[in-house]
């Protein structure tokens, strides 16, 4: 189910960007990146870390700047809005939820755009959001899509499987078995997604500026590490 708070933040972000530009007295420039992409293993607490880093980045941004906004599940809503797609296809948009055979069959029967079209539109939306700035993109190949753009920090969150299972069990209120299956299934799906559509290995360390093990550092510490990498001249 879509989180109403996430949707409201997404709308607020878009509404802010649509406002006429306001002239302000020039201030001393701050070495702060325009966007953060977060790739993650399932159960690493990416949503929690993203929430913390958005607050930290906002605290170091000019008061008149657009609020730092997280696009994860709400990114799918943004894709639908940008490309005037029917909400009935939303269930097909999460990472790697469809086989090649299902893709071809559904295209033939007109149930939805081919997955490649959806991926292209998602990529276009990500590039548009990053161009606006002050966004945190979770998943969906955001790091690969924006790899050639400057002033973007690419982060990968990892953790031991057992710790991720425990997080999923408590956070999503799953049984131990359900949490294990969830973590394994999501990891495989995300790896296939990046491999199929972007010819990249999600575990390739060269795709990221920073890899953080949330099994060794808490979420607050992870957010602080990202802040230091995003704005190294703040100290």
Image (cartoon, grey):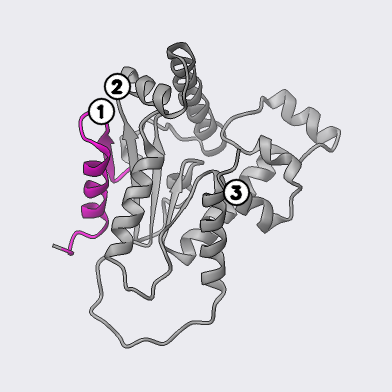
Residue at image point 38% right, 76% down? 64
Instruction: Reply above or below: 97 against 143.
Output: above
Q: Answer whether labels 3 and 2 touch (C-beta < 8 Å).
A: no
Q: Quadrant of the N terminus?
A: top right
Q: Quadrant of residue 90?
A: top right
Residue furthest to the top = 177
Q: Which residue is mark 3?
A: 122
Find disc 2 in the rendering and name its residue: 160
Closer to the camera, 193 or 231? 231
Q: Which residue is mark 1?
A: 215
Residue positioned 46% across, 24% down in the render: 173
The quadrant of the rendering that contains the C terminus is bottom left
Left or right for 202, reference 4: left
Judge whether residue 65 is colored magenta.
no
Dividing the picture into quarters, in which one does residue 113 lie?
top right
Q: Are marks 1 and 2 in contact (CB under 8 Å)?
A: yes
């Amino acid at each position: 189910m879509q989180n109403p708070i996430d949707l409201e933040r997404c709308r607020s972000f878009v509404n802010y960007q649509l406002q006429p530009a306001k002239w302000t007295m020039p201030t001393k420039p701050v070495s702060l990146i325009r966007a953060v992409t977060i790739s993650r293993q399932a159960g690493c607490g990416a949503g929690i870390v993203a929430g913390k880093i958005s607050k930290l980045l906002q605290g170091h941004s000019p008061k008149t700047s657009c609020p730092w906004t997280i696009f994860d599940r709400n990114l799918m809503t943004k894709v639908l809005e940008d490309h005037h797609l029917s909400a009935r296809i939303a269930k097909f948009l999460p990472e790697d939820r469809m086989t090649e055979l299902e893709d071809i069959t559904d295209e033939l029967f007109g149930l939805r755009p081919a997955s490649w079209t959806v991926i292209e539109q998602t990529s276009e939306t990500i590039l548009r959001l990053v161009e606006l700035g002050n966004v945190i993109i979770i998943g969906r190949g955001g790091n690969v899509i924006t790899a050639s753009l400057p002033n973007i920090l690419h982060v990968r969150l990892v953790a031991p499987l057992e710790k991720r299972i425990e997080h999923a069990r408590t956070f999503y209120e799953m049984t131990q078995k359900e949490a294990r299956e969830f973590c394994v299934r999501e990891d495989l799906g995300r790896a296939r997604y990046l491999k199929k559509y972007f010819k990249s290995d999600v575990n390739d360390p060269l795709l990221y500026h920073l890899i953080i093990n949330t099994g060794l550092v808490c979420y607050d510490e992870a957010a602080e590490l990202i802040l230091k990498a995003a704005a190294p001249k703040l100290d």
